[in-house]
Amino acid sequence: MAAGTRTVGKKKTKIRWKRVLPMYLLALPGIIYMICNNYIPMFGITIAFKKLNVSKGFWGSDWCGLDNFKFLFKSSTTWTIIRNTILYNVTFIILGTVISIAAAILLNEVKNYAATRFYQSVILLPYLMSWVIVSYLAYTFLSAETGMFNKSILEPLGLEAVNWYQEKKYWPFILIFVSVWKSVGYSMIIYLSSVVGISMDYFEAAKIDGASKWQQIKYITLPLLKPTLITLFILSVGQIFRSDFGLFYQMPRNSGALYSVTRTLDVYVYQALMKNNDYSMSSAASVFQSVVGFILIIAANKLVKRYESNSALF
């Protein structure tokens, strides 16, 4: 009896493996790519704990422990860079979420198929553009000599021309506007897919009960968008210490006069690596960025799990 049971168990295991083996084989190239691209380079983390000397090589360089991190936080610009990174990303998350949800709800109200597709394409188009192109588009507006703002708006009104790339007080607003304009299309598509998936029975029942359009949005659409909102929120929180390099480096055209309001951790890492050839310092900043991002994702997910366990990522 026991021998027969073992034989049946082996046959079931063999059948199960025959079913799942093609799936593993299909996933194998992606797994190999992920290991080579994501995990093997993680040995480079050790650079953050070394005083890298090119002549001695990667493994031969002297260990310095946490000295790179100590020097990083002793720098007079570090806290300004961290402040910029956090405040900009918090603003992007709040404004991006509100505008994306509003755009998705408004697009859902457009019943003409061709018009809906046209509006989606127009809103999504900036997301598909490279930051190099966006920076040149911005330059056509903001150039001190030939920019449209100076030549077509300020000067005809008798106002003094502004040297936009030297005046830092304008750039927080410029960066926030451009970031939201470029990124809102992607989030809007995700929210729109969730809105479209809501059963029309809820809205028809609400209409019968005399609910206004705003009441339908408030009591049906927004509550049912909560799982999508929470997922995107957790992912966004994990990237608070990451900034869009193209936005903060390409858009201001690396103007030194704007560093105090445009320099973020990603820009600092690039400048430390490419301009100062300080591999150890740039690696320390990257490790700090990654560790804090990981902690924030875990904390945000734990917070969500405490109040809305079904919406947590893990």
Image (cartoon, rainbow, N blue to C red):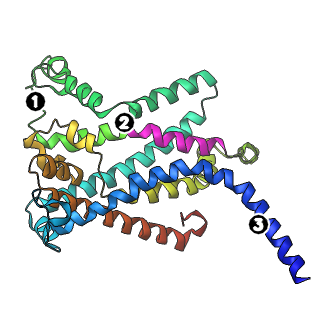
Question: Which of the 4 image quadrants contains residue 72?
Answer: bottom left
Q: Observer-nearest residue: 280 or 60?
A: 60
**Residue 243 pos. (x, y %):** 29, 50
**Residue 308 pos. (x, y %):** 57, 68
Q: Residue furthest bottom?
A: 2
The residue at which mark 1 appears reads as 162
Residue 205 visible? The answer is: yes
Residue 289 visible? The answer is: no
How far separated are the C-alphas under marks 2 and 3? Answer: 53 Å
Q: Observer-nearest residue: 270 or 130?
A: 270
Instruction: Single out the mark in the foreground, 2 or 3.
Output: 3
Q: Observer-nearest residue: 64 or 249?
A: 64
Of the two numbered discs 2 and 1 on the same chain, state the one appearing first in sequence.
1
255 sits to left or right of 299: left
Instruction: Single out the mark in the foreground, 3 or 1.
Output: 3
The residue at which mark 2 appears reads as 181
Q: Is residue 35 above or below residue 46?
A: above
Residue type indicated by callout 3: Thr
Instruction: Single out the mark in the foreground, 2 or 1.
Output: 2
Q: Residue at x 19, y 53 (%)?
A: 269
Residue 78 part of the magenta segment: no
The residue at which mark 3 appears reads as 13
- Local secondary structure at mark 1: loop
Of the two numbered discs 2 and 3 on the same chain, state the one appearing first in sequence.
3
Q: Residue at x 53, y 39 (%)?
A: 189
**Residue 100 pos. (x, y %):** 47, 42
Q: Which residues are magenta?
A: 183-197
**Residue 156 pos. (x, y %):** 14, 16
Residue type indicated by callout 1: Val
Residue 195 part of the magenta segment: yes
Q: Residues within 10 Å of mark 3 (few under 14, many from 20)?
A: few
